[in-house]
Amino acid sequence: MTKDTRIDIQVFTAIGMLVAGVGLSIAGFIVPPTGEIADSVLMFTAQCLVYAGSALGINVYINSKFSDIKKQLTKTAPQDETNQ
């Protein structure tokens, strides 16, 4: 699995979970008793939000850490050795 494929899967599953959570929340308002959401619907919506945040947040965190490491390595790496 390539890196792009993995990122695409993370993004699509996060979007799918957001759509599912919002859709179930809206359905909770529509079905009887109207305007009242069950605790299980709220719990599912919260879990969808947590999953989406973690799926997208982990990727951002890892990319920022790798870029920090790369910057540190380029600072400490010897410059052009042919000029010495």
Image: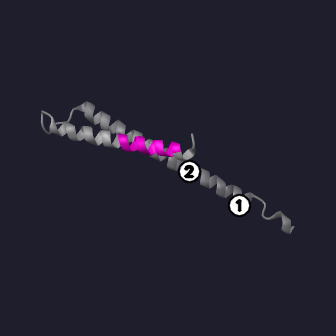
Residue found 70% across the figure and 55% down from its top? 73
Residue found 20% across the figure and 36% down from its top? 37
Mark 1: amino acid: Lys
Secondary structure beneath dot 1 equals helix
Residue found 26% across the figure and 40% down from its top? 23
* Mark carried by residue 22: none
Residue 15: x %, y % from top left: 38, 44
Residue 25: quarter of image: top left
Residue 61: x %, y % from top left: 52, 48
Instruction: Report the residue marked by disc 1.
Output: 75
Secondary structure beneath dot 2 equals helix
Q: Is residue 60 above or below residue 50?
A: below
Residue 38: x %, y % from top left: 21, 32
Q: Which residues are magenta?
A: 5-16
Specify whether residue 60 is painted magenta: no
Instruction: Count all numbered tags in the image, as a single digit.
Output: 2
Quadrant holding the C terminus: bottom right
Q: Is residue 12 above or below residue 67?
A: above
Left or right for 63, reference 35:
right
Specify whether residue 15 is painted magenta: yes
Residue 70: x %, y % from top left: 65, 55
Circle 1 Cα neighbour tier, 10 Å, few/some/many (<14 / 14–19 / ≥20): few
Quadrant holding the N terminus: top right
Left or right for 69, reference 37:
right
Left or right for 62, reference 27:
right
Residue 45: quarter of image: top left
Left or right for 68, reference 26:
right
Instruction: Report the residue marked by disc 2.
Output: 63
Prevailing SS of the magenta stretch: helix
Mark 2: amino acid: Asn
Residue found 33% across the figure and 38% down from its top? 46
